[in-house]
Amino acid sequence: MENKLYKTLGDAKCQELSKKSNTLWEMLELSESRKSTQIGGAVLEGIAKDFIREFLPTGFGLKSGLTFDAQNRRASPQIDGIIYGGVALLEFSDVVVVEKEQVKAILEVKSWLDTPDIFGVRSGKSRDSRTGLAYDFKRRTGFLPPGAKYILFTFELHSAYPDAQVTKRLGEICDFYAVILRREPMIERERGKEPWVYNFDNSVARLIEWLRKLS
């Protein structure tokens, strides 16, 4: 019953988030000025964080910023979203600096993902698995305390690789992935899948469940 509840909620939230994303790009298309992908990305990041805040228990915050590892005297690269407990070391309107030990999860937000992001850029006849998202993951995981999660959140996923390979690779790159909309490749459509799938692999539903049970 609980799994069905979260799946129903996840499916509905994905359609809601997809509509917000589409509205943003349609509005930008109406503009006669030069389109800014940076602005579009910032808005999508805000949409993603508002969604996550809906399910965060009391006592946890979510903002972009930096984590500080006092023991090793290091500051992290810029992070799209940090889920943290307690009081931040520094807090401003949209940005925080928190201690590494306060971090429950870090969030990477992408407007869309494709094959090079997931499987790495092509090098000769193969792909370099150390590139793409794997590189981002490696740069940031050192700033996670034990038990904290690395969450990958994307509005769309496009890859010709089969679903099983995509989910396996995403599971290697991050602790949680949340895919709002997956454009299914021909191989999956020939197996009977719809061209577009919301809440891909029930990933958004699983994220909602984890957030609600965070302690």
Image (spheres, grey):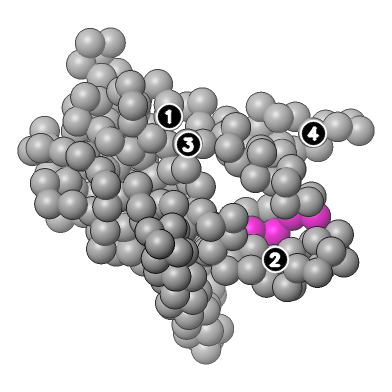
Q: Amino acid at mark 2?
A: Arg
Q: Earlier in the sequence, mark 4 or mark 3?
A: 4
Q: Which residue is mark 4?
A: 127
Image spot of residue 130 (x, y percent):
66, 27
Q: Is residue 115 visible?
A: no
Q: Farthest residue in the top direction?
A: 72
SS for dot 1? helix
Find the distance from the CA under tag 4 to the CA under tag 2: 21 Å
Find the distance from the CA under tag 1 to the CA under tag 4: 22 Å
Q: Amino acid at mark 4?
A: Arg
Query: Which of the two discs, 3 and 1, sits closer to the camera?
Result: 3
SS for dot 4? strand
Q: Which residue is mark 1?
A: 140
Q: Earlier in the sequence, mark 2 or mark 1?
A: 1
Q: Which residue is mark 3?
A: 175
Image spot of residue 99 (x, y percent):
19, 27
Q: Amino acid at mark 3?
A: Asp
What residue is rendered at 27% in x and 52% in y?
Answer: 212
In magenta segment, residue 203 = no
Q: Amino acid at mark 1?
A: Arg
Q: Are marks 3 and 1 in contact (CB under 8 Å)?
A: no
Residue interval drawn in magenta: 156-160
Q: Earlier in the sequence, mark 2 or mark 3?
A: 3
Magenta residues: mostly which secondary structure?
Answer: strand
Residue 195 in which image quadrant? bottom right
Badge 4 density bin: few <14, some 14–19, many ≥20, Cα 10 Å: some
Q: Earlier in the sequence, mark 1 or mark 4?
A: 4
